[in-house]
Image (spheres, grey):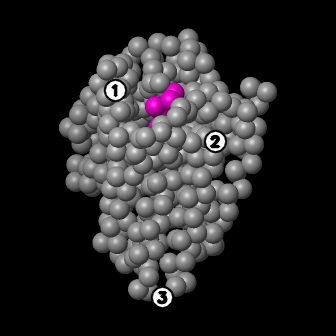
């Protein structure tokens, strides 16, 4: 039964990241056609701010209720956000901005619930000694789901239109919920939080981190791993144009090679013996990713840039997966949200 549960967990997680990939492409496309680049910026800003503001509330909900129920709720909330995107081109123009902003908020909150609840489920399914290797393998499938989601979303927009693509994506998000069925017997790992509100629960979590140096280090490393690639994605288009003298073809080549190299590295790192070594080398790998990007910033040759960015993709994917695996290993499951 435990093997079936793990397979269903991996299947749901990768399918959920497929929806995340759709959520990267679809809102930006619809927002651009509804209000230009300024509206795209507003939607992205709203999503980022909502993710930060609602994260403590998401963590509180995750640790207070059944992780399985919260996982399903997060997926339904994300599907609701996609359904709202479908209404943007149907309802009057004056409603497009509020709908896009609300869709971004729902997407951010749904993702916050999913991230915390699925971390709790993983801790219940996988013993601590196996979590690093399992998370490495899971990261490979999640990355594949993300890549497929972005590609399928672009193809669906081209062939079916953005409204139909949004409806179909929402339906897919709901259709994968039965994969959670075999997980109903998974222990929740949660604890009673009577007398705690989201603010006091967050304070308790901070006190826990301050008293547990390993957990604090793991949490900071996860944040740094994500920050490195977010900043890189923001700066890369300008770097391609101004430093490398390239266009969209070179930009696409850089992203594609980094993604492929990163997925190959995750596939190899899923071997248990290597995964255990990654647990001790997370900070070194993250520093290597940063160093490769520093060297990249001085490059003017496109071929050299492709090689270096592929190396950065390998190191970033490994550091992100290792950091998250370490977090899942050392943090108390009752506070993982």
Picture layout, residue 169 above or below residue 176: below
Question: How far apart are labels 2 and 1 at the CA level?
Answer: 25 Å
Q: Is residue 283 visible?
A: no
Question: How far apart are labels 1 and 3 at the CA level?
Answer: 48 Å
- Which residue is located at x 58 percent, y 29 percent? 189
Asked if residue 334 is among those painted magenta in the image, a careful observer would answer yes
Where is residue 233 drawn, in percent x and y? 34, 48
Asked if residue 241 is among those painted magenta in the image, a careful observer would answer no
Query: Label 2, on which residue?
Result: 68
Left or right of residue 335, residue 48 in this image: left
Q: Secondary structure at mark 3?
A: loop
Res 13 → quadrant: top right
Q: Is residue 222 visible?
A: yes
Left or right of residue 335, residue 134 in this image: right
Q: Residue furthest right?
A: 1
Pick the residue in front: 223 or 149.
223
Pick the residue in front: 146 or 201.
201
Where is residue 319 drawn, in percent x and y? 41, 28
Where is residue 195 drawn, in percent x and y? 43, 40
Q: Quadrant of the N terminus?
A: top right
Mark 3 or mark 2, which has the lower sequence index? 2
Picture layout, residue 127 above or below residue 174: above
In the image, which is nearer the foreground, mark 3 or mark 2? 2
- Which residue is located at x 52 percent, y 71 percent? 85
The range drawn in magenta is 333-337
Local crowd size for mark 1, using a 10 Å CA cut-off: few (<14), some (14–19), many (≥20): some
Mark 1 or mark 3, which has the lower sequence index? 3
Query: Label 1, on which residue?
Result: 209
């Amino acid at each position: 039964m435990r093997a079936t549960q793990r397979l269903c967990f991996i299947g749901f997680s990768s399918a959920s990241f497929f929806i995340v990939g759709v959520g990267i492409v679809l809102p930006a496309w619809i927002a651009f056609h509804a209000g230009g680049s300024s509206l795209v910026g507003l939607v992205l800003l709203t999503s980022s701010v909502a993710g930060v503001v609602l994260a403590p509330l998401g963590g509180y909900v995750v640790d207070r209720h059944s992780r399985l129920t919260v996982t399903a709720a997060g997926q339904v909330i994300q599907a609701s956000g996609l359904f709202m995107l479908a209404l943007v081109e149907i309802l009057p123009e004056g409603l497009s901005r509020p709908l896009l902003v609300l869709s971004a908020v729902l997407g951010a909150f749904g993702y916050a619930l999913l991230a915390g609840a699925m971390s709790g489920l993983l801790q219940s399914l996988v013993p601590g000694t196996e979590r690093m290797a399992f998370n490495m393998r899971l990261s490979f499938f999640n990355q594949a789901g993300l890549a497929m989601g972005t590609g399928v979303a672009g193809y669906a927009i081209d062939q079916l239109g953005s409204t139909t693509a949004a409806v179909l994506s929402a339906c897919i998000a709901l259709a994968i919920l039965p994969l959670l069925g075999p997980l109903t017997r998974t222990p929740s790992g949660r604890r009673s939080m009577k007398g705690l509100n989201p603010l006091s629960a967050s304070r308790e979590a901070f006190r826990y981190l301050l008293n547990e140096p390993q957990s604090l280090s793991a949490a900071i490393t996860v944040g740094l791993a994500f920050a490195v690639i977010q900043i890189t994605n923001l700066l890369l288009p300008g770097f391609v144009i101004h430093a490398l003298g390239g266009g969209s073809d070179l930009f696409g080549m850089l992203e594609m090679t980094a993604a492929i190299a990163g997925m190959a590295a995750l596939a190899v790192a899923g071997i248990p013996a290597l995964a255990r070594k990654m647990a001790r080398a997370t900070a070194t790998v993250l520093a290597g990713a940063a160093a490769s990007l520093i060297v990249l910033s001085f490059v003017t040759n496109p071929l050299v840039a492709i090689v270096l960015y592929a190396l950065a993709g390998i190191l970033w994917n490994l550091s992100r997966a290792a950091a998250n695996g370490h977090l899942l290993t050392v943090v108390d499951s009752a506070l993982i949200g």
